[in-house]
Image: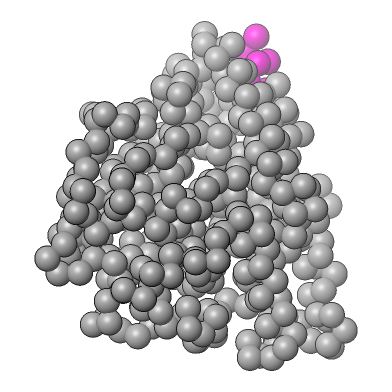
Amino acid sequence: MARVFNFNAGPAALPLAALERAQKELLDLGGTGMSVMEHSHRGKAYEAVHNEAISLTRELLAVPENYDILLLQGGASQQFAVIPMNLLPQGKSADYILTGSWSQKAYKEAKTIGTARVAGTTEKDKKFARIPKQSELELDANAAYAHITSNNTIFGSQWHEFPNVGSVPLVADMSSDIMWRPIDVSKFGLIYAGAQKNLGPSGVVLVIVRKDLVAAGRQDIPVIFQYRTHSENNSLYNTPPTFGVYVLRNVLDEFKKLGGLAAVEKINREKAKLLYDAIDERSDVFSAPVERESRSTMNVVWTVKTPELEAEFISEVQKKGMVGLKGHRSVGGLRASIYNAVPVEAVKALADAVRGFKK
């Protein structure tokens, strides 16, 4: 079969080798005579997959031992509520730095749970064209935590240097750029990410959280929403999304075989440079609205001079086997999501199409 070049924002491209492994093992996991989807989550066969996914996460991100790695459900959007439910006690406030639609949604959800305030924003005329400078932030030194969205899928901006929030735990939604490069996990109190953009299929949420925050978390909320519940039960308190965790394991194993996140970062930077250079060279037709120092390596957004030219460009690239390039419905324009699993070959083809359009 002919596979397309997939630039969808999520669910998104997965490494071909990870999919082929799933295809090969779909009916028989490790000689057990059953698919992973048929195994009990309490059985040894699935438990081995589950623990390997956690172990690979710890290894690839060099997660310190004083952090729990949780494999949960409900999407990152559920974590918008679960985080303040656990970490925002009465009498305290949480800081939210707004850089796009998802950080706005996280902030809105937190306000339904407790007290939250905007500690910084780059919204201007309903556009987020850059990441705020440290000097622009108005942080509360006594906040329960400070929340950021590390990469903004809709507006195409990204934190390349994380803010200094002092001793306040930094919480980051990394759904769209988790594992695009090595990071210092110890700078964060909690990291969370829906898997469907950069790690695996939809249905799995990765949460990396400092153990002291888990222990101090509120207990006046439902047991199923308490981080301690999932920490104490190795994320097996209830039935996890077993097939999703299995594919996540496959994807992480491919990152390891590639040489780890340093190798992943090198490829990602190459892809981003290829595409941004092409867009900038064709400023007669295309325009990238995000300030250069804030440009995302994961979601490249750009506009076309006229709606007619935009439609023509999309039609042209579709004929060349490229899909998922229409911008988010709230902002329009074009967007190429060039996550970890999108091959350099695909980005080269798109960059060539940009350079050659109406030449």
Q: Foreground: 47 or 162?
A: 162
Q: Looking at the image, which residue is at 21% across and 48% down?
A: 141
Q: Looking at the image, which residue is at 41% across and 59% down?
A: 190
Q: Report the span colored magenta.
A: 353-359
x%, y% of residue 26? 79, 75
x%, y% of residue 299? 52, 37
In the picture provided, is 73 more to the left or to the right than 278? left
Query: Within the magenta stretch, is there residue 60?
Result: no
Q: Looking at the rendering, in which quadrant would you find the C terminus?
A: top right
Q: Looking at the image, which residue is at 40% across and 58% down?
A: 189
From this view, report whether residue 79 is shown above or below residue 12: below
Q: Quadrant of residue 347?
A: top right
Q: Is residue 341 at least partly visible in the picture?
A: yes
In the picture provided, is 211 more to the left or to the right than 64? left
Q: Foreground: 234 or 39?
A: 234
Q: Identify the image's colour scheme: rainbow, by chain, secondary structure or one colour.
A: one colour
Q: Quadrant of residue 137?
A: top left
Q: Looking at the image, which residue is at 46% across and 21% down?
A: 292
From this view, report whether residue 258 is shown above or below residue 296: below
From this view, report whether residue 157 is shown above or below residue 113: above
Q: Is residue 154 at least partly visible in the picture?
A: no
Numbered disc total: 0
x%, y% of residue 215? 36, 76
Q: Foreground: 212 or 42?
A: 212
Farthest-out residue, left? 91
x%, y% of residue 288? 47, 22
In the picture provided, is 11 more to the left or to the right than 73? right
